[in-house]
Structures are given as C-alpha cells and as structure tokens.
Amino acid sequence: MFKVAIPNKGALSDAAVTILAEAGYRCKRHGRELFVRDAEHRVEFIYLRPRDIAIYVSQGIIDAGITGRDLACDSQADVAERLGLGFGKSRFCYAVPNESDAGPEGFGGMRIATSYPNIVRADLAERGVDANVVRLDGAVEISIQLGVADVIADVVESGRTLVEAGLKIVGEPILTSEAVVITRPGHNGSEELDALLRRIEGILVARAYVLLEYVVPVARRDEACRLTPGVKSPTLSPVSDPDWVAVAAMVKTKGLNKIIDALSALGAQGIIAHDIRTCRL
C-alpha cells in the first residue's frame, strides 16, 4: 500500500485532513489511532509528529508526506518538495529587543535561541557570522527576557506574539514556509503518487477560482468578456431576449468583488458566483 504521512496534531494536521478529504480520500481518524487505511485508493495514512515526517520519507519508510517547509528544511533530510499547499503560511525571522540596534550581520558572539537550529546555523554560515545557537523546544520568544539568549529566530505568522514580548523583526525572512507535499528525490512514476498530486492540485485550483455566471447586453459583451476571460475563453449562450447574452467563466476568487462591480457598471445582471469543488486545468 502507498503510505502517506500526515501531521498528528495542530493546525497543519487539521488542514491536511481537510484537503485530503476534499480530494476524495478517507483519512480522518475517529480517536487517536496512528493508521487509517483507504482501501479504495490503496493508500494508508499514518499520523506522525510533523518534525519527523521528512526523516521517514527520506529513508523510504513513508512514500509521501505533508509537513511544513520549515520543518523539512530543519530536519536536513534528503526530500523533494512536490507541491505547495497554500496553508500553514509563515515567515522564519530573527527578532531582537525593541531597544536593540543589532542586525543579522552583527550577531557575532551572541546567543540565538530557536527551535530550528539547523536552519539558523546554515544561515549564519552563509553570512559568515559566528554565533552561539541555543536550541529550545518552545516559547522561544521569552528566552531573551529570561536571560537565555540575546536574539531569537522563530516562525512568525501575525507577529503579535513578538510585539507582546517586546521584540521586533530584523533583516529579511530567513525562509518563507507553508505546508508542502514531500517525497524522496526522484520518486516518480507511482500511480498512487500521481493520483494524489493531481487530486490535491484540483482542490487548490478550485479554492482559487469561482464560476461566475451573468447576463449582459450584447452591445457590452466584448467588454464583459475582457473582464472575465476564463481559463481559455468564456462560455457564451443565447437567451430568449436577442439583445442579451449569458456568460459563464472561471475567475479568480481574489479580486472577485471588483470584477462584479465592473460587470454591474457595464449593465450585467443576474451575476452569480458558484463555488467549485474540484477542477483540472
């Protein structure tokens, strides 16, 4: 059976289960079981610590996994990123006390607390900076206040936690992260893997688009079609009134309301946006 690792807890786990379920897989567990088998698709889903997933995948114990890009990088496991999933987005950044003027190039001799020591060591080596990396498993932002570190390097989402701790981000993000599908390098040609990637891609496309339908005066048809060109071209259908035409086209969800405003200004009516469950482009 094709084996796929899923994070066993947290936001990554919930979002991974959701997208896999939308792709048609049976992967939801009903208790704390570690294995869920989808016999129909010949896939076994295994719940693991997000930090460990890349290691299992790199050793061929697991065929594919969903984890954070930051976690995969810090594991130093030999894996290939196959598909970004668009959730779990974050930045990995350095932060110092608000009153500090230190920047990444000036961290020499300082103590840097982080839960991602390998990412930090690699970045410092690239900068030619010799600093002391202090590994912590959590609550990194409080380490400066407690006297354990001078700088922290941590995952930042909204940045609110840093502000509350009296810290500020310095320098450009070391890494931008999101949930990703990983496999061993060169792992191609598997029917189950190809199907998994195609199905998830279909969900990602569906999330990014809606199907927009409306009627517009024939005299404004070309202008309307320029606003909604669709994937290849919009679908045009006659209606009982020869002065009007029905239009259907996929449009990106981002900016949808501006498109609807523009169509309305052209005289379009009956504008309806439909959610798409899955889509292949």
Image (cartoon, rainbow, N blue to C red):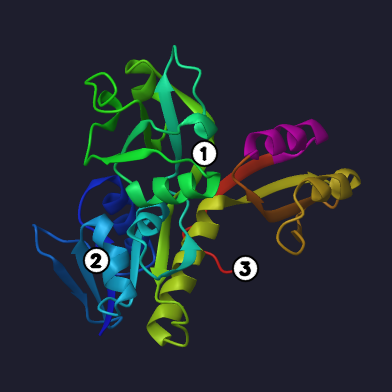
Give the labeled residue for mark 3.
281
Could you tell me which residue is drawn at 51 percent across and 30 percent down?
106
Q: Is residue 139 above or below residue 51?
A: above
Label 2 packing within 10 angstroms: few (<14), some (14-19), many (20+):
many
Per the image, is 257 magenta? yes
Instruction: Specify the amino acid type for callout 1.
Output: Pro
Q: Are marks 3 and 2 in contact (CB under 8 Å)?
A: no
Q: Examine the rendering and report whether any part of residue 278 can be seen.
A: no
Q: Position of residue 240 (x, y in %)?
A: 76, 54
- Which tag, 1 or 2, sits closer to the chain's start? 2
Question: Of the numbered discs in the image, which one, if any, rests on residue 27?
Answer: 2
CA gap, disc 3 and disc 2: 26 Å
Could you tell me which residue is drawn at 27 percent across and 56 percent down?
51
Q: Of tags 3 and 1, which is closer to the observer?
A: 1
Determine the main secondary structure of the stretch shown in magenta. helix
Q: In this view, does 262 lie above or below 75?
A: above
Q: Is mark 3 on a helix, strand or loop?
A: loop
Q: Are marks 1 and 2 in contact (CB under 8 Å)?
A: no
Q: Examine the rendering and report whether any part of residue 67 can be seen.
A: yes
CA gap, disc 1 and disc 2: 34 Å
Give the labeled residue for mark 1.
173
| Range of magenta residues | 255-269
Instruction: Specify the amino acid type for callout 2.
Output: Cys
